[in-house]
Image (cartoon, rainbow, N blue to C red):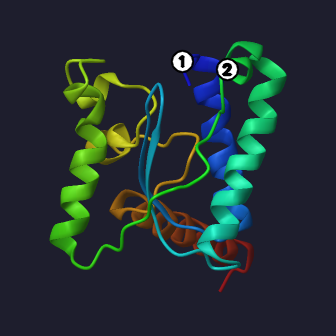
């Protein structure tokens, strides 16, 4: 995933996967040779089905824009590694690890400098290509419901 176009394509595919499988994405980082995802169990299907769909879809899409990445070996490894998060403290630790990965690898100075990460969502409330399940998102949804109710109410005067 050394190409910005391939990284963007992956994020678009992740968002489609999130929608199709009713998945909550809590965090991600796309690195040059691997990806970290912090996800919920999908609302439909299994996690294995979801990851299979994500891998297949993104590999097919990337092939159409980047011969360089498909000819230089496999786009994905055969296996993915999952870990169960058992506490909020584990959640915070894993999310921090994910967001700091590009800094640790020397790819950028600060987590907010890496464009293919959910860090800016958490730090600044920025909405990106992938909807991140967070307090920011919950507030946005609540605000949208309130605005919709207000608009509906204005259609029906007392």
Q: Residue at x 68, y 52 (%)?
A: 54
- Mark 1 or mark 2, which has the lower sequence index? 1
Residue 145: image location, x then y, percent? 56, 71
Real-space CA distance between mark 1 and mark 2, rounded to the nearest whole angstrom: 8 Å
> Label 2, on which residue?
69
Residue situated furthest left in the rendering: 89
Structural crowding at the residue carrying mark 1, measured as other residues with C-alpha within 10 Å and reported as few (<14), some (14–19) or many (≥20)? few
Rendered position, 131 above or below 64: below
Residue extending farthest to the bottom is 158
Above or below residue 46? Residue 15 is above
Horizontal placement of 39 versus 152: left or right?
left
**6 versus 154 height, above or below:** above
Q: Which mark is residue 2?
A: 1
Return the x and y of residue 88 as percentages of the image width and height. 21, 73
Depth check: 46 or 20 in front?
46
Q: Nearer the viewer, residue 37 or 127?
A: 37
Pick the front one: 53 or 89: 53
Q: Position of residue 80 (x, y in %)?
A: 52, 56
């Amino acid at each position: 995933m050394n190409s910005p176009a391939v990284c963007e394509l992956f994020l678009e595919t992740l968002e489609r996967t999130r929608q199709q499988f009713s998945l909550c994405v809590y965090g991600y980082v796309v690195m040059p040779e691997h990806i970290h995802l912090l996800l919920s169990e999908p609302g439909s299907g299994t996690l294995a089905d979801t990851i299979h769909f994500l891998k297949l879809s993104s590999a097919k899409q990337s092939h159409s824009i980047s011969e360089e990445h498909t000819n230089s070996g496999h786009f994905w490894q055969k296996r993915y590694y999952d870990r169960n998060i058992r506490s909020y403290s584990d959640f915070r630790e894993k999310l921090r690890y994910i967001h700091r990965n590009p800094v640790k690898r020397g790819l950028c100075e600060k987590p907010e400098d890496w464009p293919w990460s959910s860090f800016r969502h958490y730090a600044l409330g920025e909405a990106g290509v992938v909807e991140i399940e967070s307090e920011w998102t919950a507030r946005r949804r609540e605000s949208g419901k309130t605005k919709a109710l207000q608009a509906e109410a204005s259609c029906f005067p007392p």
